[in-house]
Image (cartoon, rainbow, N blue to C red):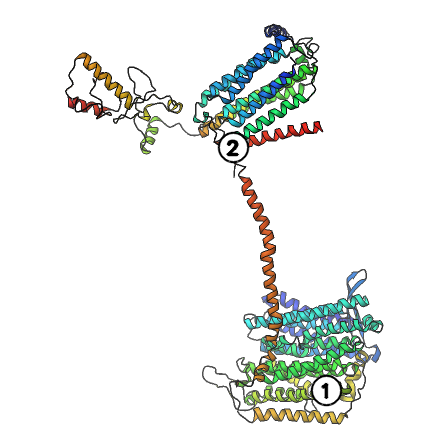
């Protein structure tokens, strides 16, 4: 069975190669090929999963060594895969949700001329992400990491004819580069410290390494995770990434890309466990992002950007949980999986709404759509209930666990983190209810006649079926995982698990969560469900305006990074023009001037040349005599 | 063999002619010394003449003189064969070639000694002086005390000695110079040979070209041939009395050998006319109107018969004279 | 008199000839000055021959004469050709070899 691991990556990679190199003759069937290969990868994942379940708990990790990649003396890099429970979870999520999004894209991208290319990129995205989670060393992980960055660049900028999309793609790529630098530095430190970067040896060696080095590695890994998972301070690309087609947003936000950071932190758990300072930073980053994303989600009128803020916030939850150490890893991954279901469902739902509304994204121009898109309404609604943590649905279980673990951190930290997560839950409920109310309830704020006439309609089967499947996942996944603590036990061999000792009882936490949920939903409903909503956003308070601009993140970046960069560049250009060019041009001018003057000697008169010849002969005679005399 | 003996005999006779002894040690005979000082001075003067004389023919002649003196010096130094060759080949053939080419090329304005390149003369003087001083200083420095003399080498006769060397030691160089001479001869022919690539244009065609180019169509006017001179170096005069350039050969013009017979010449002519008239007791009715002072360009009413050769293109004054009469 | 005076004379003639090459513009006179230089060196060679007591110097002078004859032939041919194309025997007129 182990030989199948390579196929997991190979199938979508083959799809990408065939679709991107195949040319136009694949235009008609290319999307089916891409979907089939993604699905085959999922089937292989299921087979491996079944096989893995048959093994003893401790024996479940599988390895496949493909070939030696860079065998240099003392530097051994292999292309080898490691499939343990953590990777398995990701594989199933990536390929499962990925296949559904492929299926959805068939309908969504139906009218796009470059659909084949789009599927090629999607396959590339899956392949890179699978490589990332299956790699058994950090260097191969880095390859997948960069592949994800490349694929996201290509997909976000897929509608490259729009300048905004091209800019967004560039922005995502550049911000990701900052994180990538962190990862490469972490790998370098690892290599100098441990002499290897394979997971096993590195994690075993953490016991004998100084905490300072581990903290450095941890912080660099965190930087990488921040870049990929859009955590503060590298969060700015996520909102703009909505310029890509909606399936891409779903793929980035649910199954791939942003989860990579959480995977990296969880995978490197051994390092973080031994570096408490780094862990604290992870928690802080998670907590800040959690609130940041939630606030941003409240202020956005663009449905996809509101969902993007939500993603940022939910990933913040995961980071926070991952930063808690062994008491949180399993919950982080659990939330990641359930979030994968409902966020994919929500994005696909949003895409379905946009599909029916002539690609309108402003929620203030929606309203009362539940009658026109019943399937979308129901699936989106189930996703909504899941994300806000409605009791019994996926989100409830996973988020509740994280809040409990946050309290279990202990001490003042525990109380602060607990409160933050609770506040986050309330705000989540608020902004998601806002999205629901603006989109599906209230009176319609669009017209079926006139210049901007829209005719809302339900999306085709290929789009609704994935949404229905994901809705099932949103509803039941959490309960399934929680059942008998099955998910925690499943991951325990990889991530370890400790029961946190919360100062509050589980019941108390749950009830507080529910109260926060009720407050959030109630406020939002009072604000947006009961009262008519203006079709044009009111100016709002200073804070609202700031939040609408993502807390001025871009302005901050502009002032803190872009401007100094520009000044530096100008300075360098000045130095180049004046100093470097001055020296170069000065030399050239000197030589040119001297030549121009020396040229006059070459006057073309043979008698002048004869004079020099004769003079030369005289000099020769003089030299000869002089040598004689000496 | 017979040629060699005759050459030897000739050489022997020239030795006596030169009045010197080829064989000597560190000093030479007084006769040779005298010959050296006298002829050496002449040679240097000839060389200077070659450089500084304005006319190339004079230069060539000075050079020929220097070469002949050098031939005498060769003989004095025991190089009998070279002395003869110098006279026969150099002075005889090469210099004649030079003169021949000089004649071909003709006399042009470049013969003037005016320098055109800035600083050239100073540089030349500096280099020449420096080089000469260095060379002579170097010679003075060298310790040349004794001359071995050529009695031994010339024991079998100079020509025989040379021939022995040429046909043994230097035979390859000799053959090569033969090849060189052949090549040079061919080269000279190739260089000077002109292939006529187009048909020679006929007289009629050339005339047509001249008409088309609006050049002088009829034959050039004849020079002003006066009875006193009967020469081609006197330009004919235009109606206003100025000399016409067209009437004199360009070579004479560029040499500056044109005799001017305008203004003052005419005045003297007019005076002559008057004297002749007085002597003959002739009355000149048109004299007051057409005096030489008031109208120097016009013919002062001389006899048309005497004046017939005057101006070829000068029909108008004649006619005016006819009227006045 | 010491026969070394012939060498002095040769040096003097050579220098005069060289100066002539530098000063005169008429190609034919320049050429004649070159001949003068060659003759001066021939005189030196002949004197050397006497100095060393063998005929090698005279042989050298002989070859110089032969080569000079060849040179005169070719050189004058060049001058004639030049004169035909430029209607001038001035060496300054052929001054196209400059920038």
Whether residue A382 is visible here, answered yes or no, is no
Q: Secondary structure at mark 1?
A: helix
Pick the residue in front: A184 or A588. Answer: A588
Question: For the residue labelled by badge 2, is the local secondary structure a helix, a strand or a loop?
Answer: loop
Q: Is residue A505 above or below residue B98?
A: below
Which numbered marker is on residue B118? none
Residue on which the image places disc 1: A416
- Answer yes or no: is residue B278 visible: yes
Residue C55 spot, x, y in % from top left = 67, 15
> Quick check: marks 1 and 2 in contact, CB under 8 Å?
no
Give the position of the N terminus of chain B as an image quadrant.
Answer: top right
Q: Which of the chains bears the disc numbered 1? A: A
Residue A173, given in percent of the width and then of the height, sits at 64, 70
What residue would you read off at disc 2? B119
Q: Position of residue B177 (x, y in %)?
A: 62, 21
Task: Tell me the distance, in whole angstroms, between the alpha carbons under discs 1 and 2.
Answer: 98 Å
* Vertical comparison of A152 with B298: above or below: below
Pointers 1 and 2 within a single chain: no
Q: Which chain letter matches label 2? A: B
Q: Residue at x 70, y 20 (%)?
A: B143
Q: Nearer the viewer, mark 1 or mark 2?
A: 2
Residue A220 location, x and y as percent? 73, 72
Q: Residue furthest right?
A: A208
| Quadrant that contains the C terminus of chain B | top left
Q: Quadrant of residue B39?
A: top right
In this rendering, position of residue A8 left or right of residue B11: right
């Amino acid at each position: 069975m182990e030989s199948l691991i390579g196929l997991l990556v190979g199938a979508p990679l083959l799809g990408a190669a065939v679709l991107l190199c195949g040319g136009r003759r694949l235009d008609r069937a290319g999307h089916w090929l891409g979907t089939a290969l993604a699905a085959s990868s999922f089937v292989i994942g299921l087979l491996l999963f079944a096989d893995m379940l048959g093994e003893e708990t401790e024996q479940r990790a599988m390895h496949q060594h493909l070939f030696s990649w860079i065998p240099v003396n003392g530097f051994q890099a292999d292309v080898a895969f490691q499939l343990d429970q953590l990777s398995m979870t990701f594989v199933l999520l990536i390929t499962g949700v990925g296949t559904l999004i492929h299926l959805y894209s068939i309908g969504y991208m139906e009218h796009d001329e470059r659909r084949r290319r789009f599927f090629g990129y999607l396959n590339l995205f899956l392949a890179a992400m699978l490589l990332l989670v299956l790699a058994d060393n950090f260097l191969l992980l880095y390859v997948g990491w960069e592949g994800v960055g490349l694929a996201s660049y290509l997909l976000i900028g897929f509608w490259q004819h729009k300048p905004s999309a091209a800019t967004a793609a560039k922005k995502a790529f550049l911000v990701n580069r900052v994180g990538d630098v962190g990862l490469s530095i972490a790998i370098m430190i690892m290599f100098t410290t441990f002499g290897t970067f394979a997971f096993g040896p590195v994690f075993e060696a953490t016991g004998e390494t100084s905490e300072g080095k581990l903290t450095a590695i941890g912080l660099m890994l965190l930087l990488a995770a921040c870049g990929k998972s859009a955590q503060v301070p590298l969060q700015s690309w996520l909102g703009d990434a909505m310029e890509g087609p909606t399936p891409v947003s779903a793929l980035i936000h649910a199954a791939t890309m942003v989860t990579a950071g959480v995977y990296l932190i969880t995978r490197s758990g051994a390092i973080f466990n031994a570096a408490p300072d780094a862990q604290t930073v992870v928690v802080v980053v998670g907590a800040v992002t959690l609130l940041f994303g939630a606030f941003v989600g409240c202020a956005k009128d663009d449905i996809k950007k509101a969902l993007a803020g939500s993603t940022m916030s939910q990933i913040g939850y995961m980071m926070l949980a991952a930063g808690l150490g062994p008491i949180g890893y399993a919950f982080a991954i659990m939330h990641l999986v359930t979030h994968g279901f409902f966020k994919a469902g929500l994005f696909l739902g949003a895409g379905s709404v946009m599909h029916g509304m002539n690609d309108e994204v402003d929620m203030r121009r929606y309203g009362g759509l539940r009658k026109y898109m019943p399937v979308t309404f129901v699936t989106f609604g189930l996703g909504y209930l899941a994300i806000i943590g409605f009791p019994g649905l996926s989100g409830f279980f996973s988020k509740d666990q994280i809040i409990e673990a946050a309290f279990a951190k202990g001490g003042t930290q525990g109380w602060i983190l607990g409160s933050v997560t609770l506040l986050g839950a309330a705000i989540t409920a608020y902004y998601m209810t806002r999205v629901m109310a603006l989109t599906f309830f209230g009176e319609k704020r669009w017209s079926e006649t006139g210049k901007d006439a829209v005719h809302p309609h339900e999306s085709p089967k290929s789009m609704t079926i994935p949404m229905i499947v994901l809705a099932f996942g949103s509803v039941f996944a959490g309960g399934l995982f929680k059942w008998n603590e099955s998910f925690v036990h499943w991951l325990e061999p990889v991530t370890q698990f400790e029961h946190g000792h919360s100062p509050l009882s589980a019941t108390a936490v749950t009830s507080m969560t529910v109260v926060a949920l009720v407050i959030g939903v109630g406020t939002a409903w009072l604000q947006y469900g009961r009262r008519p909503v203006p079709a044009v956003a009111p100016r709002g308070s200073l804070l609202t305006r700031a939040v609408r601009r993502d807390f001025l993140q871009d302005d901050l970046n502009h002032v803190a990074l872009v401007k100094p960069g520009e000044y530096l560049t100008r300075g360098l250009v000045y130095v180049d023009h004046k100093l470097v060019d001055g020296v170069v041009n000065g030399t050239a001018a000197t030589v040119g001037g001297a030549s121009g003057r020396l040229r006059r000697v070459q006057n073309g008169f043979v008698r002048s040349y004869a004079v020099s010849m004769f003079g030369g002969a005289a000099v020769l005679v003089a030299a000869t005599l002089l040598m004689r005399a000496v | 063999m017979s040629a060699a003996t005759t050459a030897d005999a000739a050489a022997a006779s020239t030795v006596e002619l030169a009045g010197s002894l080829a064989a000597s040690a560190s000093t030479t005979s007084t006769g040779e010394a005298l010959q050296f000082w006298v002829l050496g001075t002449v040679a240097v003067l000839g060389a200077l003449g070659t450089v500084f004389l304005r006319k190339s023919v004079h230069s060539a002649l000075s050079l020929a003189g220097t070469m002949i003196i050098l031939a005498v010096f060769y003989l004095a130094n025991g190089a009998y064969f070279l002395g003869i060759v110098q006279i026969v080949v150099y002075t005889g053939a090469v210099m004649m070639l030079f003169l021949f080419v000089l004649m071909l090329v003709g006399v042009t304005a470049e013969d003037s000694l005016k320098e055109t390149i800035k600083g050239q003369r100073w540089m030349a003087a500096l280099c020449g002086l420096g080089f000469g001083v260095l060379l002579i200083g170097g010679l003075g420095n060298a310790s040349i005390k004794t001359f071995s003399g050529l009695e031994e080498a010339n024991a079998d006769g100079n020509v025989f000695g040379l021939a022995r060397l040429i046909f043994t030691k230097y035979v390859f160089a000799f053959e090569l110079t033969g090849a060189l001479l052949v090549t040079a001869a061919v080269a000279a022919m190739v260089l000077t040979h002109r292939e006529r690539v187009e048909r020679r244009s006929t007289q009629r065609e050339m005339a047509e070209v001249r008409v088309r180019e609006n050049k002088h169509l009829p034959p050039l006017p004849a020079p002003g041939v006066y009875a006193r001179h009967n020469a081609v170096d006197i330009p004919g005069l235009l109606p206003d009395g100025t000399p016409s350039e067209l009437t004199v050969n360009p070579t004479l013009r560029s040499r500056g050998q044109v005799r001017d017979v305008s203004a003052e010449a005419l005045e003297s002519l007019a005076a002559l006319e008057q004297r002749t008239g007085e002597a003959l007791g002739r009355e000149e009715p048109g004299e007051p109107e057409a005096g030489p002072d008031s109208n120097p360009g016009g013919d002062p009413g001389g006899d048309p018969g005497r004046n017939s050769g005057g101006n070829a293109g000068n029909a108008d004054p004649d006619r005016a004279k006819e009227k006045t009469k | 008199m010491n026969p070394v005076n012939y060498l002095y004379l040769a040096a003097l003639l050579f220098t005069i000839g060289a100066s002539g090459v530098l000063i005169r513009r008429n190609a034919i006179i320049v050429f004649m000055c070159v001949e003068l230089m060659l003759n001066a060196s021939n005189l030196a060679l002949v004197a050397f021959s006497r100095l060393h007591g063998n005929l090698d110097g005279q042989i050298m002078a002989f070859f110089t004469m032969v080569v000079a004859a060849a040179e005169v032939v070719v050189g004058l041919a060049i001058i004639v050709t030049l004169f035909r194309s430029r209607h001038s025997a001035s060496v300054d007129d052929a001054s196209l070899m400059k920038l």
